[in-house]
Image (cartoon, helix red, strand yellow):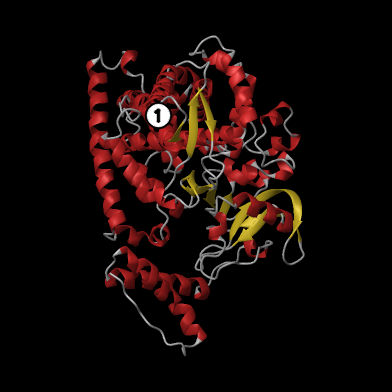
Amino acid sequence: MYIVIHFSYAATTFHNFYSAPLVMSTSLISKSNLNPTYVAAISVVLASGMIYRYTWPKKKSQLADLPTPPNPHWFWGHLPKVIDTTNNQRIAEEWAETYGDNIAVDGLIFTQKKLWTLDPKTIGYVLSKASLYPKPEDSIIALEQITGNGLLVVEGDAHKRQRKVLNPAFSPARIREFVPIFFEKSKLMVTRWTEIISENGGQESTVDVLNWMGRATLDVIGEAGFGYHFNALVDESNELAAAIAEMFRSLTSFTIFGILQRFFPIMRNFPTRRNRSIKLNRDIIHRIGNDLVSEKKEEILKSSEGTKDDLVRDMLSMLVKSNIASHDLSQEEVLAQITTFVLAGHETTSTALTGFLHAMSTHPEIQSKLRQEVLAVSTTTPSIEELNSLPYLDKVLRETLRLHSPATITNRVATQEDVLPVSEPFIDKNGQKCHEIRVQEGDVIFIPILSLNASPKLWGPDAKDFKPERWDAPPGAISAIPSVYSNMITFLSGPRACIGWRMAILEMKVFMFTMIRNFEFKIDPALQIRKKTVIVSRPYVVGQEEKRNQLPLIISRYQSGDE
């Protein structure tokens, strides 16, 4: 239904200012088949937010005195620039050169200024104080709708408790047991790609590697995560896989209504087509997940009171076994880890591997050099030690994770007044020299992951270039970056650093080894590839937006390859 509301051109500026949300909500949100009642409710919420912003007395934050780029939009503020993955690095670099590493940016019109920081010392402090700087509630809405109260979402004591229970599942010893799964799925993908090439007369073929990476890593996390066979590399009709994919599509579709739901919880209950789809697929996930948890629990209890290790190979079995003894997690929390495993161990790894293949297709000399190294290995199934002894593979992996981080930005919110340290003094808008940044309760801090990973100030003038050789003598400045891996912030740091980073690195090495050993990758030079970030950063082809996210590459069998 379309609703049109007219305003007189003779209205006063004040009237236009406060009625603007009503115009916007009716012109944009009504196109989502909302009835007039919902549109009116949205308009009231927006207008109330604006009135609150400009009339309600609030304690002034020092962020208002920080250097600030010109506000590009009266309503959206700097938000479009913050989430603009294509130009994010360039924008961050321009801001840093003009205004410094610690600046203030404008959010939506009814919100206060936020801190945008490329200062490693400031970032390290914030990430190390997880209890003082949790994720803002509005930032985890999409994740919560997918995972429930899983490890990615919960904060405080709940996060500590869940992480304590999950830590054993991600120990180096346990991850080693998943290596055969990594090789099995990578080789199955080789088989499937070879079949596609054969069907094309043995000639090179074009495949959407983003789709295939997603299917392969879904199979991996299904078996390693909870002993479930998606068989996505063979058949995409699996009910659970379809429900997860559809929910992810619903939550990653960029709409005005979706953005507003983050800030106004009441709107999440509106019976829109998007919300109905989310509920339907979440119910499917919960039904199958409950069955999986019940089966694991029954198997463990039947096997000599859960003492047999051969029944606890996957992460969910380990979690259920541990919980039988300790009762640390509720049934809902155990169930939430299934979708958490899928999102954290599937979407992120598949996106990073897609970035690797894109880099190889645009840097044939690097691709050739890497292939020479992996072909020198005498086996198609090397041990972990053999994989880790391949220096160029390791450098290409590091460069991939540096420039193709699945998460491009994160944020935190101050829960109390605090003082943030800075690497070097700066001058605020009032001409005052500042040696620290004072924040108030509610102040939001943006941490641009991708921009920090490609900061010329830290990485040198060639920071944006894909250059594995930089790891032969990495710049000393990067030692200041808070990190759990190789002085990059891809996996964050502190108490909320990625729990599965070791597993991701090993899984990526196996897939990189197998793919580059068997195939050559090229890209059509006429294609323009950009990225869009909603939860994770994924590529799309300019001019083919209707096909959503994709990365079509031209693949051919390498003549000396093997399966």
Of residues 471 and 260, the one nearer the viewer is 471
- Is residue 205 visible from the viewing direction of this image? yes
Answer above or below: position of 90 versus 403: below
Q: In terms of depth relative to the viewer, which is nearer, 54 or 160?
A: 54
Q: Which residue is mark 1?
A: 200
Residue 2: image location, x then y, percent: 31, 72
Q: Residues within 10 Å of mark 1 (few under 14, many from 20)?
A: few
| Front residue (pair 525, 307) | 525
Left or right: residue 73 compared with residue 341: right
- The residue at the far bottom in this view is 10
For residue 342, above or below residue 110: above
Q: Residue at x 39, y 28 (%)?
A: 196
Q: Is residue 519 left or right of residue 98?
A: left
Label 1: element kind: loop
Question: Residue sitting at 61 percent across and 56 percent down?
Answer: 115
Residue that extends furthest to the top in the rendered view of this protein = 378
Residue at image x 56%, y 13%? 386
Q: Is residue 59 left or right of residue 270?
A: right
Task: Indicate the quadrant where residue 431 lies.
Answer: bottom right
- Assign the N terminus to one quadrant of the image: bottom left
Instruction: Evaluate whether residue 419 shows in this view.
Output: no
Total count of labels:
1
Q: Quadrant of residue 155?
A: top left
Q: Quadrant of the C terminus?
A: top left
Image x and y of residue 368, in percent: 61, 24
Residue 456 at what x, y percent from top left?
Answer: 72, 44
Query: Where residue 156 appears, x then y in whole percent?
Result: 46, 43
User: Against 154, is 56 above or below?
Assistant: below
* Residue type (three-letter) at the residue carrying disc 1: Asn
